[in-house]
Image (cartoon, grey):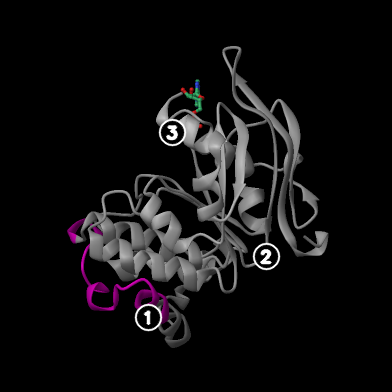
């Protein structure tokens, strides 16, 4: 692919925990407006990969380039400001606050400052939040406390809160975990819509869901790249079959 179309490139990324290489010399790149799914058996290094991209874990070797910028010297907060949004596996929303208040708190610091100075709930901000609530299927729940939402709705709220910060790259760790079949379907549509204007990297296990949403799939195994291609291509790859069948 044209290097200009790459939004993310990791080169030789490596990290060890107690001498065990969780990610081992991994290189891959993600294009603009691509929805990439990362799969692989438990312990393959998927979460650790996302942790290194967002600055939560420091690689011992290799580098992460985002829009051509080496993120190696930046801390987690600086990386967020470059346009990388990360969602962890468990939804983290403010349970005692309403959906509306959660969205208000998700805004970048400048907005937060304006809010504390009394510019809270301007019509323009409210319109933006209403539009976002609609995108993540929460229009009817805007006045409800987040604690009253279903697990899936909390995942949606968190995705919406991330989107309010207008990231260019979204890193999502198992966003459909704990969702009903209907919620999964809606989330698939949401992720495809998001990837029309942003790049999305998703860790996911459910191959039916992967086939439905992925532009391309990266398969990790023992911290290394095992296979890459369309969902159909990686599913037909003998190396992938061997790993999943355990021989
Ligand atoms: P996956 O997300 O593919 O299931 P992980 O990235 O969570 O895999 O983990 C890869 C390996 O690294 C596992 O063996 C895991 O036990 C280990 N690991 C991950 N994070 C840490 C940590 N903070 N300390 C020690 N070992 C870790």
Name the residue furthest bottom: 123
Disc nearest the viewer among 1 and 3: 3
Q: Which label is found at residue 6?
A: none
Magenta span = 131-148
- Give neighbour class at mark 1: few <14, some 14-19, many 20+ (Cα, 10 Å): some
Which label is found at residue 244?
3
Q: What element carries label 3?
A: helix
Mark 2 and mark 3: span between their CA atoms? 30 Å
* Most frequent secondary structure within the magenta stretch: helix
Horizontal placement of 22 versus 26: left or right? left
Q: Is residue 247 above or below residue 122?
A: above
Crowding at dot 3, Cα within 10 Å, few <14 / some 14-19 / many 20+, comes out as: few
Judge whether residue 115 is colored magenta: no
Say above or below: 142 vs 220.
below
Disc 2 secondary structure class: loop
What residue appears at the point 65 percent right and 31 percent down from the top-left corner? 58
- What residue sits right under mark 2 in the picture? 32
- The numbered mark, 2 or 1, whose residue comes first in the sequence reads 2
Q: Which of marks 2 and 3 is in front?
A: 3
Q: Left or right: where does residue 46 sit relative to residue 60?
A: left
Residue 135 sits inside the magenta stretch: yes
Image spot of residue 159 (x, y percent): 42, 61
Please identify the quarter of the rendering in which residue 53 is found.
top right
Q: Mark 1 points at which residue?
A: 130
Task: Report whether the residue tagged 3 is closer than 8 Å to ligand 1.
Answer: no
The quarter of the image holding the N terminus is bottom right
């Amino acid at each position: 692919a044209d290097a200009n179309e790459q939004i993310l490139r990791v080169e030789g990324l490596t990290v060890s925990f107690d001498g065990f290489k969780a990610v081992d010399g991994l290189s891959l790149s993600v294009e603009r407006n691509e929805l990439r799914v990362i799969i692989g058996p438990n312990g393959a290094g998927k979460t650790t990969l996302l942790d290194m991209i967002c600055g939560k874990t420091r690689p011992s070797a290799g580098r992460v380039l985002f829009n051509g910028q080496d993120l190696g010297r930046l801390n987690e907060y600086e990386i967020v400001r470059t346009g990388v949004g990360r969602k962890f596996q468990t939804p983290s929303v403010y349970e005692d606050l309403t959906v509306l208040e959660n969205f208000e708190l998700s805004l970048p610091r400048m907005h937060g400052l304006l809010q504390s100075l009394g510019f809270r709930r301007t019509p323009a901000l409210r319109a933006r939040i209403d539009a976002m609530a609609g995108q993540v299927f929460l229009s009817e729940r805007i006045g409800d406390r987040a604690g009253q939402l279903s697990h899936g709705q909390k995942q949606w709220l968190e995705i919406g809160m991330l989107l309010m910060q207008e990231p260019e790259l979204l890193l999502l760790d198992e966003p459909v975990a704990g969702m009903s079949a209907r919620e999964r379907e809606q989330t698939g549509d949401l992720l495809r819509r998001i990837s029309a204007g942003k790049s999305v990297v998703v860790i996911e296990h459910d191959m039916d869901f992967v086939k439905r949403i992925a532009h391309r799939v990266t398969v990790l195994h023992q911290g290394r790249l095992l296979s890459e291609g369309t969902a159909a291509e990686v599913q037909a790859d003998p190396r992938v079959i061997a790993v999943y069948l355990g021989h």
